[in-house]
Amino acid sequence: MPGYHNVPDIKKKAGVANFRPLGKRGVGKPGKGEQTTKGGIYLPDTAKEKPQEGEVVAVGPGRVSDDGNRIPMELAKGDRVIYSKFAGTEYKDGDDELLILRESDILAKIS
C-alpha cells in the first residue's frame, strides 16, 4: 500500500493474520512480566501486574499534518518500548497476545 513505511505483515504458522496499523498506531507484543517474586514464590497469570514493556511488531504510516503532509512514526519494528500502564487495545490471536497502541501512549524506547 502506498504511504506505508515499515509496515510488515505478521504471518502466523497456524493461519495468517495481517496487521496494518492505521495512522499513528503501532502493534506491540507485551513482555511476559515477572514469573516469580524475589523470594521465589510463583505468580499465576491472574496475580501478575500488567506489563508496561514490549516489542514493536508493526507500525502505521504516521499522522497527517494540517497541511496534508505525512509525519512518519518515530518507532520501527523491533524497537523495545515502555508504554502507559492501561494503554492500548488488547488483541489475542491464538497464543499470541498483542497490544494496539497510539504513538502518544508510548513513553520511551529502550536502547
Image (cartoon, rainbow, N blue to C red):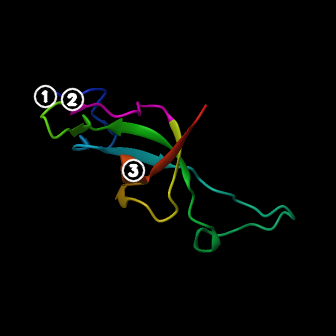
Q: Residue at x 33, y 37 (%)?
A: 59
Outermost residue to the front? 67
Question: Magenta stretch: residue 96 in it?
Answer: no
The residue pinned by badge 3 equals 104
Kindly report which numbered mark, 3 or 1, lies closer to the viewer in this rendering: 3
Residue 17 picture quarter: top left
Around disc 3, counting alpha carbons within 10 Å, would you say few (fewer than 14), some (14 to 19), or many (20 or more)?
A: few
Membership of 72 in magenta stretch: yes
In space, the residues marked 3 and 2 are separated at their CA atoms by 19 Å
67 up-or-down from 52: above or below? above
Residue drawn at (31%, 27%), measured in percent from left and top? 6
Per the rendered image, the range of residues in magenta is: 70-79
Judged from the image, the secondary structure of the residue bearing numbered disc 2 is: loop
Which quadrant is the C terminus positioned in?
A: top right
Q: Which amino acid does label 1 sit on?
A: Met
Residue drawn at 39 percent across, 50 percent down: 104
| Secondary structure that dominates the magenta span | loop
- Residue placed most toward the observer, 90 or 40: 90
Find the residue positioned furthest to the right.
Answer: 39
Report how far apart the C-alphas of labels 1 and 2 lie in the structure: 6 Å
Point out the tag, 3 or 1, that comes first from the N-terminus: 1
Position of residue 49 measured from the top left corner of the image (x, y, whole percent): 61, 67
Q: Give the structural element (helix, strand or loop) at label 3.
A: helix
Element carrying mark 1: loop
Instruction: Tell whether label 2 touches label 1 (CB within 8 Å).
Output: yes
Contact (CB < 8 A) between labels 3 and 1? no
Give the labeled residue for mark 2: 4
Question: How far is mark 3 from mark 1, CA to CA?
Answer: 24 Å
Name the residue that disc number 1 marks: 1
- Amino acid under disc 2: Tyr
Amino acid beneath label 3: Ser
